[in-house]
Amino acid sequence: MKKLKLFTIAFAALSIGVFANDSEDSQTIYKVNTEKSKVNWVAKKVTGQHNGNISLNPGEIIVEGNDVVHADINIDMKSIVVEDLTDPEWNKKLVDHLKSDDFFSAADYPKANFKTTAFNQKENSDGINYSVTGDLTIKGITKEISFPVKVEIMGNQLTANGSATLDRTRWDVKYGSGAFFKGLGDRMIYDDFEIEFDLVATTETIN
């Protein structure tokens, strides 16, 4: 009888340990909601600035336990929108120019991609809880970038909010750059542009 009790206790302890490990090692995949997610951009030049948005293609964020461990985000380069120009003709001209080989060559490179290589936990007064590092591919060129992000998980939904400043010339976007062309005067476009993103994703659990 004592042996039976000991066996029962040992089996129960082993079972708890197995289920606990499964819980700790389980992954949850959050699929990016392309309709609810937003990516805004701002580009500046000597005489002013332009702003707009760009859409996402399907992507995913992976969480292990309570920690974000990986993200694979796809950007639709053909979806560039300019918001500050209200004249339809001038708006179309700028959109077409941004999609052209002078800038992002959207016909040849319709998708940009960002894959994370590290999520480092951090905390600050703004609620930022991760510093993200990853590889951003634009026009077939891959460069490493890092930026802070605020991630929140509520039930089956994950949100990620943040911003980054990027030097476009790293991806061979040199049109109007004072670093490569002299005498541009007020036609010069600054190399840095800013993006601000609000990602929304929902779960799909895998075993």
Image (cartoon, rainbow, N blue to C red):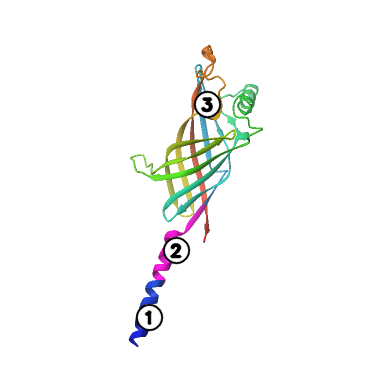
Mark 1 and mark 3: span between their CA atoms? 67 Å
Residue at 55%, 36% in the rendered image:
137
Q: For this view, does 22 lie left or right of residue 100? A: left
Residue 7 tag number: 1
Q: Is residue 53 above or below residue 184?
A: below
Q: Position of residue 189 (x, y in %)?
A: 52, 20
Element marked by disc 2: helix
* Stretch in magenta: 15-29
In the displayed image of the protein, which residue is found farthest to the bottom? 1
Q: Earlier in the sequence, mark 1 or mark 2?
A: 1
Q: Earlier in the sequence, mark 3 or mark 2?
A: 2
Q: Is residue 70 above or below residue 91?
A: below
Q: Position of residue 54 (x, y in %)?
A: 57, 35
Question: What residue is disc 3 on?
Answer: 169
Callout 1 amino acid: Phe
Say whether residue 42 is magenta: no
Name the chief secondary structure element in magenta.
helix
